[in-house]
Amino acid sequence: MGEKVKRSTRRPERPKQPRGPEEGIAFLPVSYPSVDEVEFSDLYELEELEVDTEDGWRLVITRYRPRSQPFPQPLFGVPLLLVHGYTQNRRAWNAGEFVKNMLYFGTDVFLLELRGHGKSSVAAQRRRARREGTPLPDDLEYRWDLDSYLLYDIPAAVAAIKTASGRERIAYCGHSLGGILGYAYATLADDLLGLATIGAPSDFRRMPLSMRMLGWVPPLAFGAADLAHAWVHFGHFALRAVGRAAGLWRPGPDFSPQRFRRLPFRAAFQWFDSTLRKGAKGPQPGLAFRNPLLYQPRNVALGALRPLLREGANDEPRATAEQFARWLRRGELVSYRLRHDIAAAFPRIRIPVAIFFGDEDPFASVRTTRNVYRSVSSDYLLWRPVRGSSHLDLTMGHDIRQICYDVKNLISYALDHDTARPSLPHRRRTPARTRA
């Protein structure tokens, strides 16, 4: 009889495939350096872009072009425009570690300095005019207003960054006034990939009463200053007329009447820096810093704050303060030259939006940002406070890393859904009735 053969039901094992360069380290986790372990200077190459606006200004954009790193950079080469706030310049972003955190993700960072600020200063326009023989801008002597930023500076910067990066759409992040300009631009244009605002109010009707009352300061204070200048000019001409009649007046250089056109924020911030240099630990008694108006000392290191005070403040035209004051008095957010109601146009915003504000910030809060959160038509919408922070803390304080990660997530979502439609139908939010 034949011998029975026992068949095995066991399946043959497949040869193991190596998962790494060596089989012995295939399952070892890969560790990458944290942002604190990477040198800031190793993350970028510094460039400067000069941008000409339609009304004759030349703006400077500081570019931090990312370098390829041996760790993942999910946003490598994605252009991100950073726009500073009122009276500030590029130092609002690079005095702390905001730029470094965004470069860690590979973002191509562009720091715009609006007209009259930083490297886009009035003095820089005069130097360029002498060097190139070009005419000076018509509003050079501090005659521009907030609409000038929206009509000329932001569009010129966006167009230049699109050309420099080779991208059709860019991400936008603005602090304070820069965020308000971002709201306005997003209602007018469609070349933004995503919008992040930091400490940017959108509803001036919900401002605290003390802030609303400040809206009456410019018309009263500026009117008094104009009256004082008028009396000085009248006295000068009267004395000259009397001297001429008495034969005592001697011809001299032509008298140039002085005009009150700018607010000396630069001198005020430098004075505050001098108080810190003399050994002060924080805000002085009697100043407006007793309440968290600008920053919380516990959140900002002096090493980051002092460069901002020393180099990051700029004088502002009185017209910009007058426009802010008008928004406060009327409780509106309007571009007067365009006759464009920015707040009413919030439903036009369909790109991903992230709104950040400090829970101790009197300017941007739950109350003053609620209307943009409820009005925009975005499928990706983040609206959240940063605990224990005020106004300046959000771009240079100890908690900026969580903001940068949220900005990274916003841009990642925008890239993944730039051309694809949402899988679920968009549902419009209906504003809920809230108490004033």
Image (tube, rainbow, N blue to C red):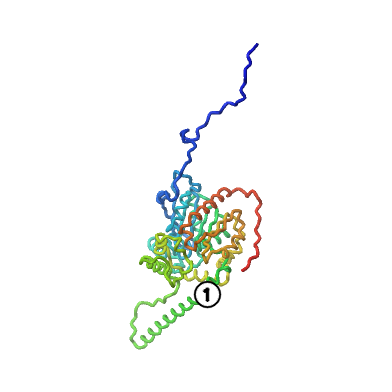
- Residue 369 placement: quadrant: bottom right
Vertically, is 417 above or below 18?
below
How far across and how far down the image is residue 238, in percent? 40, 85
* Residue at x 63% of width, y 67% of height: 435
At a point 51% along the width and 75% down the height, the residue shown is 219
Mark 1 element type: loop
Q: Which residue is mark 1?
A: 216
Which residue is drawn at the image coordinates 34% and 80% (left, top)? 251
| Residue 133 seen | no
The residue carrying pointer 1 sits among few (fewer than 14), some (14 to 19) or many (20 or more) residues within 10 Å by Cα, namely some
- Whether residue 62 is visible to the viewer of this picture, yes or no, is yes
Three-letter code for the amino acid on which mark 1 is drawn = Trp
Q: Residue at x 65, y 11 (%)?
A: 1
Quadrant for the C terminus in the image: bottom right
In the image, taking residue 128 as reference, residue 341 lies left or right, namely right
Q: Position of residue 124 (x, y in %)?
A: 40, 62
Dividing the picture into quadrants, the one containing residue 7 is top right
How far across and down, in percent of the image, does residue 21 sit? 46, 34
